[in-house]
Image (cartoon, rainbow, N blue to C red):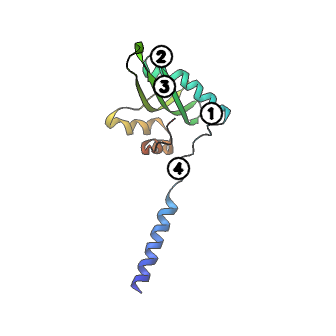
Amino acid sequence: MVIRRHAVWLGLAIGLLTGCSEPPYALPDPDAADVQAEEERLATLLPAELLGGPGTCEVRLLGRDGSSSFAWAHCEAAPGGGDVFGLSIPVRVDGDRVTQPGDGSGYSVSVRRMFPERLAEAVLEDDGRLRP
């Protein structure tokens, strides 16, 4: 009888935990024409903003909200043909204004301020599927 009661409680707990979990954050379709157009716009805008000059960026659009675009950018530059340097970060773009998260202990606070709640959580979990 005791084993049966524990089995019922365990089943209820597993069901509750499974039922409460949310599906992964849904990303925009990378094959959609509007998504590709926005990724191209961001890839053109971001090198100057993030690298301070010429370079290249690969961009994965993570979502939009009104005039704001949320993306993950992987950018590289080789100033004067020397060593390549780069960065890979989530960004928020409002028109031509680019916001990037803070460093160190300010990272998670700034990500939560930059992105909608579910997207912020996905960025902070960073399972790699958000990156270009």
Cα separation, mark 2 vs mark 4, equals 35 Å
The tag earlier along the polypeptide, 2 or 4, is: 4
Q: Residue at x 58, y 29 (%)?
A: 39
Q: Earlier in the sequence, mark 4 or mark 1?
A: 4
Q: Position of residue 25 (x, y in %)?
A: 53, 46
Which disc number belongs to residue 35? 1
Q: Tell me if residue 116 comes above or below residue 39 in the rendering.
A: below
| Amino acid of disc 2 | Pro
Q: Between 102 and 77, which is closer to the camera in this rendering?
A: 77
Q: Which residue is mark 3?
A: 98
Query: In terms of secondary structure, where does tag 2 sit?
Result: loop
- Judged by depth in the image, the label closer to the viewer, 2 or 4, is 2
Q: Residue at point 46% right, 41% down?
A: 123
Q: Nearer the viewer, residue 33 or 81?
A: 81
Residue occupied by mark 2: 54
Q: Are marks 3 and 1 in contact (CB under 8 Å)?
A: no
How many other residues sit within 10 Å of disc 3, few (<14), some (14-19) or many (≥20)? some
**Where in the figure is residue 29, as x and y percent of width and height?**
62, 40
**Alpha-carbon neighbours of circle 1 within 10 Å: few (<14), some, or many (≥20)?**
some
Outermost left residue: 105
Q: Which residue is mark 4?
A: 24
Residue at mark 4 to residue at mark 3: CA–CA distance: 26 Å
Counting residues from the N terminus, which is met first, the one under dot 1 or under dot 2? 1
| Quadrant assignment, res 41 | top right
